[in-house]
Amino acid sequence: MSETNDQGDLGRLIGLAEQLLQRLDTALPPAPPPLDWSAPAFRWRTRPGRGGWLESVKHPHAIRFDDLHGIDDQKAQLTQNTRQFVQGRSANNVLLTGARGTGKSSLVKAALNAFAGRGLRLIEVDKEDLVHLPEIVDLVGERREHFIIFCDDLSFESGEPGYKAMKSILDGSISGMPDNLLVYATSNRRHLMPEKMSENLETVHTDDGEIHPGETTEEKVSLSERFGLWLSFYPVDQDQYLTICAHWLQRFGLDEKSALAARQEALLWSLSRGSRSGRVAWQFARDYAGRTAKKRR
C-alpha cells in the first residue's frame, strides 16, 4: 500500500514539474531565428534571459559614395582603408568625429554598399551592448567574410563598462583582434568622453617648461588613440549645402531646372533649422520633392 502511495506522489510531482516547465517556456521570449550569413549587415541584439545574438538586416540603407558631397578627403581615406581590408591587407580601425549631420554615419553605410559584393559585412552594436564584444569576436573570427563593427554616435561617461570593453578589443586584450574584423565608430567628441574644466587642474608643469596632462585626460585620450585613422567632419558652407540639396532633389525625381528653382526655399529651410548640413539638405529635398510631386499630379 505504501509503495503504491509513493508511486502516486511521484507521479503527481512529475506532473507538477512538467506544468511548471511549460509555463516557464511560455513566459520566456522565443529563441532568435537562424542567422542568415549571406545578409550584408547585422545588428547585435540582447534580451533578458536569452543573452545576445546577431540579427540579419536584409535591406540596409542604400546610400552611395556619389550621394556624399563636401567630404571628398574623408571619402577617399575611408575608401582606401576599407579596400585594403577586404583585400586581406592591413587596415586601421577608424574614428569619425565632428559636427552633427555632416555624413559620418552615411560614409560608413556607403562603404558597406560599395564593398558588400567583395565580402564586407557590417555589424551595428549599440553602446550598451559593447560588453558583448568578445562574444561577437568569437562568432565571426573564423569566418571568411570581413566584418566591420559599427558603433554610431559613440560617447562614454566615466565608469561605463562598454568603455573598457572597447579599449580591450581595439588594442588591449591578450587574444587580439582577428584579421577579418575592424571597428568603425562615429562620435561628436574626439576623445569619446566629456571634458571638464577641473581636469586642467591635474596638468603638471615641469621646471623645463614641459606640460604633462593629468591622469584623467590621459585615460580619455587613450581610447581614441587606439583608432589608427581619424577622420574629422565640419559644417558645410552655403554653396556646398545648395549643391547637396540639388543632388537629392534630382535623386527624388526632379529635373535639374526644378532643382535650381528650389534654391531660395532650401536656404529658408536651413535658416529655420539653424544649421546647414548634408542631413538638413536631405530632409529639405524629401519635403520639397514630396510637395511639388503632389502639385504636378
Image (cartoon, rainbow, N blue to C red):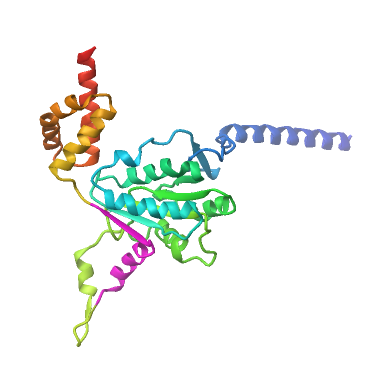
Magenta span covers which residues?
212-233
Could you tell me which residue is drawn at 58 percent across and 50 percent down?
Answer: 143
From the viewer's perspective, is residue 259 above or below residue 114? above
Who's the residue at 42% across and 52% down the image? 82
Q: In which quarter of the image is residue 288?
A: top left
Query: Residue 111, relative to residue 21: is it above or below?
Result: below
Residue placed at 20% from the left, 67% from the top?
A: 198
Give the answer, above or below, for where 280 lies relative to 82.
Answer: above
Name the spot of residue 286 as percent of width and height, x first: 25, 28
Q: Extreme front residue here? A: 256
Coordinates of residue 269 in the picture (x, y in percent)? 14, 33
Figure label count: 0
Say if the magenta span includes residue 133. Answer: no
Query: Along the horizontal axis of the image, is 149 left or right of 272?
Result: right
Q: Where is residue 253 in the image (x, y as percent from the top left)?
A: 27, 24
The quadrant of the rendering that contains the C terminus is: top left
- Judge whether residue 223 is colored magenta: yes
User: Residue lying furthest bottom in this view?
Assistant: 207
In the drawing, does residue 115 fall left or right of residue 100? right
Residue 88 appearing in the image: yes
For the residue pair 124 and 115, the one nearer the viewer reads as 115
- Quadrant housing residue 84: bottom left
Closest to the observer, 4 or 96: 96
Residue 43 in view in this figure = no
Seen in the image, is 40 located left or right of residue 289? Answer: right
Q: Which of 120 and 6 is in front in this view?
A: 120
Quarter holding the N terminus is top right
Residue 81: percent from left, percent from top: 40, 55
